[in-house]
Image (cartoon, helix red, strand yellow):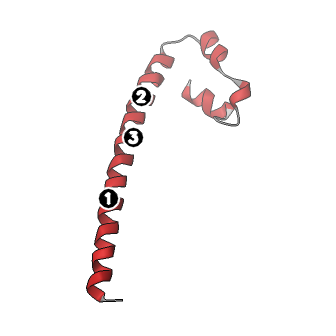
Amino acid sequence: MEPAKAVQEYKSKIVELEAKNDEYAKVVGQLTVEKDWAVGKLKSLDLSNKKAIIDKSEHKTISILKQCILD
C-alpha cells in the first residue's frame, strides 16, 4: 500500500468520524435540554404525584432508583 493512499484513507475516515461526532453532539445537546425541561416540570409536582409516576414495570429500561432520582 502506498503511504500517500493510506494517509488519504485515514483523512477521509477522520472527516467521516468528525461528522458523526458532530451529529451525536447535537443529539446529546437536544436530549440534555429535554431532560432539563422534564426535570423542572417534575420538581413542581407534589410527593404523591411523584410517587404515582414511578413505573415499576419500566425498571429494566430506567431503574426505580433512577426514576426516583429524576423525580
Instruction: Work out whether residue 20 or residue 59 is closer to the camera in this orientation and state it.
Output: 20
State the separation of the CA atoms marked 2 and 1. 24 Å
Instruction: Give the mark, 1 or 3, whose residue is nearer the N terminus.
Output: 1
Residue 45 x, y percent position in the rendering? 53, 12
Instruction: Give the mark, 2 or 1, whose residue is nearer the N terminus.
Output: 1
Q: Quadrant of residue 64?
A: top right
Q: Amino acid at mark 2?
A: Glu
Which residue does the image show at 36% across and 54% down from the upper left?
21
Q: Is residue 57 left or right of residue 62?
A: right
Which residue does the image show at 66% across and 33% down from the upper left?
65
State the separation of the CA atoms marked 1 and 3. 14 Å
Name the residue tied to disc 2: 34
Name the residue tied to disc 1: 18
Name the residue tied to disc 3: 27
* Closer mark to the observer between disc 3 and disc 2: 3
Which residue does the image show at 39% across and 40% down from the upper left?
27
Q: Amino acid at mark 1?
A: Glu
